[in-house]
Amino acid sequence: MFPAELPGGEKAMATKILTVDDDSGTRGFYKFVLESAGFIVETAVDAASAVTACEAFNPDMLLLDWDMPGGGGKVVMEKIWKLLDKKIPVLFITGLPDKVDVDLLAGRISVLTKPVNIDTLLTHVDCLLK
């Protein structure tokens, strides 16, 4: 998952992931795991800061909590898709998987239940980015 080497020995641009969760420990865990795997990670605490971070960061993928202050994960996803004018992959990680709108699960969207282990997290990220 580390940045690929291009012809001539140059490194490809690392994938950027925006993680949004209102719990600081959870955000820190995601950031550590994903950065250790070679991703560039930015974090946000709620819906408003997620949209602001997205404008500056231009992520390749979103990792979202379903239930968060200022609007749920679905609202954040839709705002960011509109802002970026594209549907980037989304991984919802939630303690409330039964509340996730199952109609969303087609395509490049996936759901994991908290707590999530490192291998499962990285496997889902890798699958969504392919």
Image: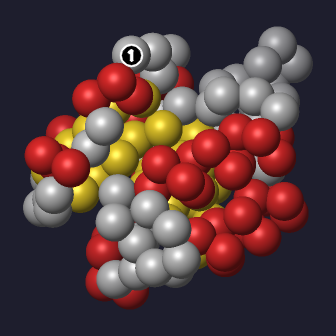
Total tally of numbered discs in the picture: 1
Asked whether, in this view, residue 50 is left or right of residue 130, the answer is: right
Q: Is residue 13 left or right of residue 61?
A: right
For residue 36, say whether it is visible. no
Q: Position of residue 108 (x, y in %)?
A: 47, 22
Report the residue that reaches farthest toward the bottom: 24
Q: Position of residue 100 (x, y in %)?
A: 26, 44
Q: x and y percent of residue 81 in the render? A: 70, 39
Query: Looking at the image, which is closer to me, 56 or 76?
Result: 76
Q: Residue, x 50% and y 61% (percent of image)?
A: 19
Q: Residue at x 69, y 50 (%)?
A: 79
Residue in view at x 33 percent, y 32 percent: 110
Q: Which scheme is used to colour this image of the protein?
A: secondary structure
Q: Give above or below for 22 relative to 35.
A: below
**Residue with the mark numbered 1:** 106
Q: Is residue 107 above or below residue 20?
A: above
85 w.r.t. 72: above or below: above
Q: Amino acid at mark 1?
A: Ala
